[in-house]
Image (tube, rainbow, N blue to C red):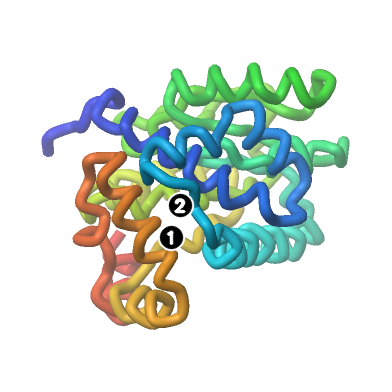
């Protein structure tokens, strides 16, 4: 199998600016501050050649996804899964928010350039926290770059693996690599993987009827990343199940 180089995914990271722009119109903590620090609005205006006039349309979907994931996380925290690893954390504020709880160990991860930038942004917004870590990880890399032997994770403590948006940019073959790496780390620590990224053409077609803005955002994301993300979805829920069971 041909191993993709991390550099081939670097163009995905600018799409984090697009989502950061829409997220600032929500009540998610630190979202506005992050968007302002990276000047997300200017980036969007350059892409669109005009100011987006209805960002709230997509913001509702972005906010719902973020909060739905948090709700699922809270259910697992009740079972002592207090070690959290977020893949492709980009400009998500979840690490800053959740690490306010000193009982939680939160690991933000992304490609080297992106995670370095994120760490610098976090330093501008909060004081250093002993329970918030930053790791350079290409989630598709084989052998795995996941933290399998680190002092802040313990084999008797289950982990929660998160990714919000990452898989939508990956081909099925690349998704398989992520699945393999997640399976490996869960075999070591135990725990759960939470992601809303197993999108289907059926589901997206329904969303696009409700939100034309989502369709425009997806097309722009495809253009910016240079990846044909509209070809990377599953056909339907049965296709998702078949794929997942085969990993």
Which x, y percent locates residue 236?
A: 29, 79
Side of 129 where 68 appears, left or right:
left
Check disc 2 and report its element: helix, strand or loop. loop
Where does label 1 land, which residue? 197
Which x, y percent locates residue 10?
A: 33, 28
Side of 165 where 73 appears, left or right:
right
Q: Nearer the viewer, residue 20 or 99?
A: 20
Q: Nearer the viewer, residue 178 or 212?
A: 212
Choose top left, top right, bottom left or bottom right for residue 214: bottom left
Side of 96 where 240 appears, left or right:
left
Where does label 2 land, which residue? 165
Q: Which mark is residue 112?
A: none
The answer to whether the residues at label 1 and label 2 have Cβ atoms under 8 Å apart is yes
Task: Indicate the quadrant containing the C terminus: top left, top right, bottom left or bottom right.
Answer: bottom left
In percent of the image, x 33 and y 69: which residue is there? Answer: 245
In percent of the image, x 64 and y 61: which residue is there? Answer: 63
How far is mark 1 from mark 2, CA to CA? Answer: 6 Å
Residue 159 drawn above or below residue 38? below
């Amino acid at each position: 199998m041909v191993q993709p180089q991390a550099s081939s995914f670097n163009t995905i990271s600018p799409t984090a600016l697009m989502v950061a722009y829409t997220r600032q119109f929500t009540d998610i903590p630190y979202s506005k501050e992050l968007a302002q620090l990276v000047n997300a609005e200017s980036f969007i205006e350059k892409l669109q050649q005009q100011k987006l006039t209805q960002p709230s349309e997509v913001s509702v979907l972005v906010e719902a996804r973020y909060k739905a994931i948090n709700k699922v996380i809270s259910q697992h925290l009740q079972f002592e899964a207090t070690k959290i690893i977020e893949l492709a954390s980009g400009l998500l504020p979840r690490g800053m928010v959740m690490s306010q709880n000193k009982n939680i160990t939160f690991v933000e991860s992304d490609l080297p350039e992106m995670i370095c930038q994120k760490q610098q942004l976090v330093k501008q917004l909060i004081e250093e926290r002993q329970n918030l870590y930053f790791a350079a990880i290409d989630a598709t890399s084989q052998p795995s770059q996941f933290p399998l032997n680190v002092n802040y994770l313990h084999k008797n403590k289950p982990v929660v693996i998160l990714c919000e948006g990452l898989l939508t940019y990956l081909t099925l073959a690349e998704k398989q690599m992520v699945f393999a790496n997640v399976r490996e780390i869960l075999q070591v620590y135990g725990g759960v993987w939470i992601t809303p990224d197993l999108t289907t053409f059926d589901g997206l077609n329904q969303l696009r009827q409700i939100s034309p803005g989502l369709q425009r955002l997806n097309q722009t994301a495809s253009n910016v990343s240079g990846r044909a993300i509209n070809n990377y979805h599953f056909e339907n829920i049965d296709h998702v199940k078949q794929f997942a069971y085969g990993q």
